[in-house]
Image (spheres, rainbow, N blue to C red):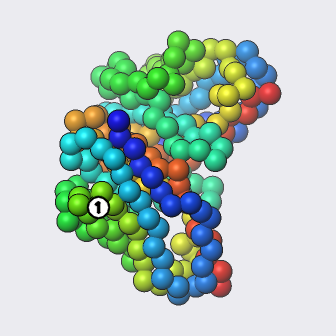
Amino acid sequence: GNSVTQMEGPVTLSEEAFLTINCTYTATGYPSLFWYVQYPGEGLQLLLKATKADDKGSNKGFEATYRKETTSFHLEKGSVQVSDSAVYFCALSDPGANSKLTFGKGITLSVRP
Amino acid sequence: EPEVTQTPSHQVTQMGQEVILRCVPISNHLYFYWYRQILGQKVEFLVSFYNNEISEKSEIFDDQFSVERPDGSNFTLKIRSTKLEDSAMYFCASSATHTGELFFGEGSRLTVL
């Protein structure tokens, strides 16, 4: 079955540091890949997505590239801000599966001023 | 901006009691979902709902669970006889299309004592 593995957290960074959050997946077929973010007290929000190999999703300075050869979708940001403190979830959606998402465990990012 | 709303935000109940979690999806969305996250674990798919019937459900979604869209705006998750292991954050989501972005509510935290 489908699965998503995220690196263990939590992650604590200083403001303006470089961020990488690793995500790898196992899936049959050709899934779409997503990063969702959950800010304190809020629901999950779509951060970015990529629907096919070599696509790069980007939003709010975050980027992730769909790497089929390494089955990865690592999230990066060049310079994090305190306001980026949140929980980040990697997820995949099997195209034929009714938009059902399979999530990773999530990782908490804390950014210090 | 339209959003998915969930009530209650937190419910505490005794084991064996019935619980109903309520969701108001975005008004023009057609696909509805429940997910849950047990503390420290992954966000797990429970059930998807389209055209007034369940389109897919997970192994977790046993006979104790049911969903309903009673009035064209609310989407409810009922747990008939709660168990300790039902303690989790329950997220409702909706989508305009079956391949579209899922919009999540803030979640309802259920604590079973």
Percent across and percent down for residue A32 are 27, 51
Q: Residue B24: in sight, yes or no? A: no
Report the quarter where the C terminus of chain A lies: bottom right
Who is closer to the viewer here, B17 or A24? A24
Residue B44 in sight in this render: yes
Q: Which residue is labeled 1 in the image? A: A70
The residue at 35%/72% (across/down) is A63
Q: Looking at the picture, tell me which residue is in the foreground, B91 or A6.
A: A6
Residue A69 placement: quadrant: bottom left
Q: Residues within 10 Å of mark 1 (few under 14, many from 20)?
A: few
| Residue A16 against residue B53 in the figure, above or below | below
Residue A77 to residue B74: above or below: below
Residue found at x 21% / y 47%: A30
Q: Quadrant of the N terminus of chain A?
A: top left
Residue A88: x %, y % from top left: 50, 60
Query: Which percent across, then down, holds residue B5?
Result: 53, 42
In the figure, is residue A54 to the left or right of B36? Answer: left
Q: Chain of mark 1?
A: A
Position of B22 with respect to B30 (left or right) is right
Q: Where, by quadrant of the figure, is residue A9 drawn?
A: bottom right
Residue A84 appears left or right of A98: right
Q: Amino acid at mark 1?
A: Thr
Horizontally, is B15 left or right of A108 in the view? right
Outermost residue toward the front in this view? A70
Q: Nearer the viewer, residue B99 or A108?
A: A108
Q: Position of residue B36 (x, y in %)?
A: 55, 37
